[in-house]
Image (spheres, rainbow, N blue to C red):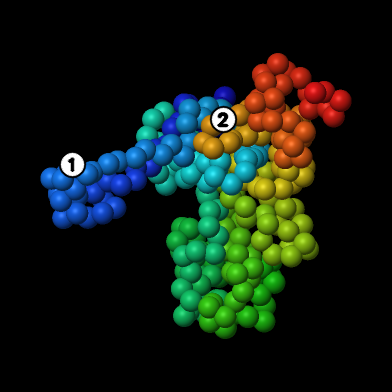
Amino acid sequence: MSILEVNNVSIRYMTGDFKDIGLKEYIMRRLKGDYHVREFWADKDITFSLEQGDMLGIIGTNGAGKSTLLKAISGIMEPTKGKVVRKGNIAALLELASGFDGDLTVRENAYLRGAMLGYTRKFMDETYNSIIEFAELQEFQDRPFKQLSSGMRSRLAFAIASLVRPDILILDEVLSVGDGAFRKKSEAKMREIIAGGATTILVSHSVQQVRELCNKVLWLDKGRQVAFGAAEPLCGLYQRYLDKELTLEQAAELWEQGIPAVPDIV
């Protein structure tokens, strides 16, 4: 039984409407016949489903619509068309370093973020030391948060958020935070969560990371669904596209024909 179903989801942004220019300017332009609204579809007709324990990697170059799709899946925004069906609780790690108060200390921000995620004070008291240790911020606990580097901020956010045990976990580039050692530690933490049965969605620019962690892949390009399926062959096809061995059209055609992504196919 599917734990997540995305059915023909399309997300439209409107540019040039009165919300952007103000009511007065809107009236003036309408009177002059100079009012134009443009549509931009960030995602168009995206369809896939996931079972419990699946780990989906979403790949695609910048502007593919990956982050916008995650917002629809997590419930932050409603699709313009189509439907998202979720079963169980969902946790989304999006824009990790946002939402902190720069004037509060690291310790105070840890408790603040925990409260925002629904953790009790008792739970935070019990887990605070492990959070700080995981984030490698033992020497910075009483410093103002604004003194931390962007990497330190992301590490703290990841350490707090990875305490959750959701049915569906959404990760947007969060495994790229910190140095190489911390990335390995964060990947190990995600493997632990996945092993616990969570269905996970990962957006990453690292094809190798997606190939190693995920069993399914969704390839997007300019808001369109290029392919959805098993990770190994699809990652191979995507890498050949990145290496300019194949055009987007050739890659999509090969996938539709069911041809695996081996180097000797042209």
Observer-nearest of 216 and 68:
68
* Residue 243 in view here: yes
Q: Residue at x 76, y 29 (%)?
A: 233
Using the image, tell me which numbered label, if any, was put on residue 33: 1
- Using residue 263 as the reference point, say whether residue 234 is left or right of it: left
* Residue located farthest toward the left when viewing the structure as drawn: 31
Name the residue carrying label 2.
225
Using the image, tell me which numbered label, if any, was put on residue 226: none
Which x, y percent locates residue 57? 65, 39
* Residue type for callout 1: Gly
Q: Residue at x 46, y 39 (%)?
A: 42
Image quadrant in which you'd find residue 176: bottom right
Image quadrant in which you'd find residue 263: top right
- Using residue 24 as the reference point, say whether residue 128 is left or right of it: right
Observer-nearest of 90 and 146:
146
Q: Quadrant of the C terminus?
A: top right
Say if 71 sits above or below 262 in the image: below
Image quadrant in which you'd find residue 124: bottom right
- Using residue 53 as the reference point, say whether residue 182 is left or right of it: right
